[in-house]
Image (cartoon, rainbow, N blue to C red):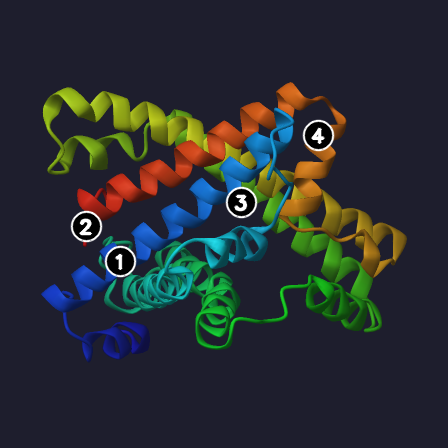
Amino acid sequence: MSATEKLFSVVPSSPSSGLKTLARFGFAAKGIVYVLLGLLALLAATGQQGGQTADKKQAVQTLQDLPGGSLLLGLVAFGLLGYIVWRFTQAVVDTEDKGSDAKGIGRRLGYAGSGLLYASLAWYAAQLAWSGSADGSSNGQQTLTAKVLSWPAGEWIIMATGVIIIGSGLYQIYRAYSGSFHKHVNASDLPANQQNLVYRTGQIGYTARGIVMGIIGYFFVQAGRQSRAAAVGTTDEAFDLLASMGPAVLGIVAVGLMAYGLYMLVQARYPVLRI
């Protein structure tokens, strides 16, 4: 038995029912965030009041103005925490049977990375729920980028980060049309007459998410090429770029992100991954 296998053998072989429930809360919270994100962009594309090109934190902030906003924000924060815990469980327990070879470890580290990406959003939602205010600016990302650019070969590191993000976006699109998640939909507890609808919704969602990730990755590549931290951007700037191509382009991607959010909500109700 290798050292890696010994390390993973000390953890439980399957997650508890409580952890599975926590995972469902996580996917539901992620779904809500994406539905809000897409809805705000769709309203902006159609010129409706309240529409805006927003990032995830700005989308979450809209819950603050709803009745019971603090409670809703608290639930989203709790759900995102559940998502983070579940992603780390996937990485350690290997719920998806990726194995302990180099490829499997890479995929499992990807699960952990996915969880980490939502840590700041969970903290932001918790701050809003607790105190009603939080710093939702993207200056932190630019500050970190500026720091990396000051390192030796910092430009190459930022460009490499951009290439990785672009690759992740392309993988989302590949996943949408390769049918890699179709078998999970068919193996889920979904009623047979709804499986195809959910699969198509997932395809649209993964495609839109891949497009947005590709644009964000492009921003990082440009920041590295220009050695300019201000060139990096979040979902907000990606929406702005899409809007410059026309409201129809922004609207289509916005609907796609809403579809991705709905797919996450379905996954919370009828787990598509093995949870």
Q: Is 16 rendered above or below residue 232? A: below
Q: Nearer the viewer, residue 228 or 198?
A: 198
Residue at the far front: name it: 67
Lateral position of residue 141 relative to residue 86, left or right: right
* Residue 184 placement: quadrant: top left
User: Along the polypeptide, which appears first: circle 1 or circle 4?
Assistant: 1
Residue 113 rendering spot, x and y as whole percentages? 46, 62
Q: Is 5 rendered above or below residue 79? A: below
Disc 2 marks a residue whose amino acid type is Arg
**Mark number for residue 243?**
4
- Per the model, the C-alpha gap separating discs 2 and 4 is 37 Å
Mark 2 closeness class: few <14, some 14–19, many ≥20 residues within 10 Å: few
Lateral position of residue 119 relative to residue 251, left or right: left
- Per the model, the C-alpha gap separating discs 1 and 4 is 32 Å
The residue that disc 2 covers is 274
Q: Nearer the viewer, residue 64 or 91?
A: 64
User: Along the polypeptide, which appears first: circle 3 or circle 1?
Assistant: 1
**Mark number for residue 168?**
3
Residue 74 rendering spot, x and y as whole percentages? 37, 67
The quarter of the picture where the C terminus appears is: bottom left
The residue that disc 1 covers is 25
